[in-house]
Amino acid sequence: MRRDSKQSDGHGPSVSTEDNELETVDTRLPMDVVRLEWTGGMSVRSLEARAGFTPGRLSQWLRPGRRGKYPTVYGLQSFATAYRAPLAVISRAFAEEAGIPELHAGDPPPPSPAPPEYTPEERRLVEDFRRTREPVRSLLAETVHMAAQRENRREGTA
């Protein structure tokens, strides 16, 4: 992924994936960037469920009142498990949010996430999308985006 300096909708720069998909990322929140990069943007509630955690185990650390606080080792490990990311990546992001980036001074650079593994259905969707032209392409993209937003509202993550 590469970060573009282009402002999308006032929330931060866009992140371009290899498939030229754009998602806005608020660069002031490193854990949100980690979630996008390591989980493909899955909702926290979905990540908790996938990991078999009780609801709130992760989201408690991401609430506005706790944002900027460095979690316990148990909390860090929970994020690493749910995000399927190295503990160092999670710790570094929380340290940045907490204003203590020096906690990782001298550490080697964190590893990059592995490319996502797509299901055959997802691969077919991308291939079909690439074969379409405007205005169909824009309509398809907006339809999928609206469906994802609706799903996030159902999960309570919007």
Image: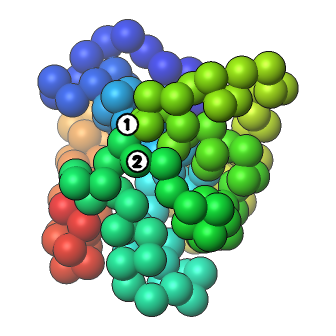
Q: Is 19 drawn above or below residue 66 in the view shown?
A: above
Residue 41 position in % (x across, y down): 45, 54
Q: For the residue marked with disc 2, what is the amino acid?
A: Lys
Give the mark, 2 or 1, whose residue is nearer the N terminus: 1
Task: Characterize the local packing of mark 1: few (<14), some (14-19) or many (20 or more) Cα atoms within 10 angstroms.
Answer: some
| Residue 60 sits in quarter | bottom left
* Residue underneath mark 2: 69
| Residue at screen point 22% across, 54% down | 65
Report the coloring of the rendering.
rainbow
Say whether residue 72 is visible. yes
Look at the image and tell me in which quarter the C terminus lies: bottom left
The residue at which mark 1 appears reads as 29
Q: Nearer the viewer, residue 49 or 144?
A: 49
Q: Badge 2, how many Cα within 10 Å: few under 14, some, many 20+?
A: some
- Mark 1 residue type: Leu
- Please state the total of marks drawn on the protein image: 2
Locate residue 154, reporting x and y percent: 19, 79
Give the CA distance from mark 2 to mark 1: 12 Å
* Residue sticking out furthest to the top: 5
The front one of 4 and 76 is 76
Viewport quadrant of the N terminus = top right
**Horizontal relation, residue 131 to residue 113: left or right:** left
Mark 1 residue element = loop
Residue 120 to residue 39: above or below: below
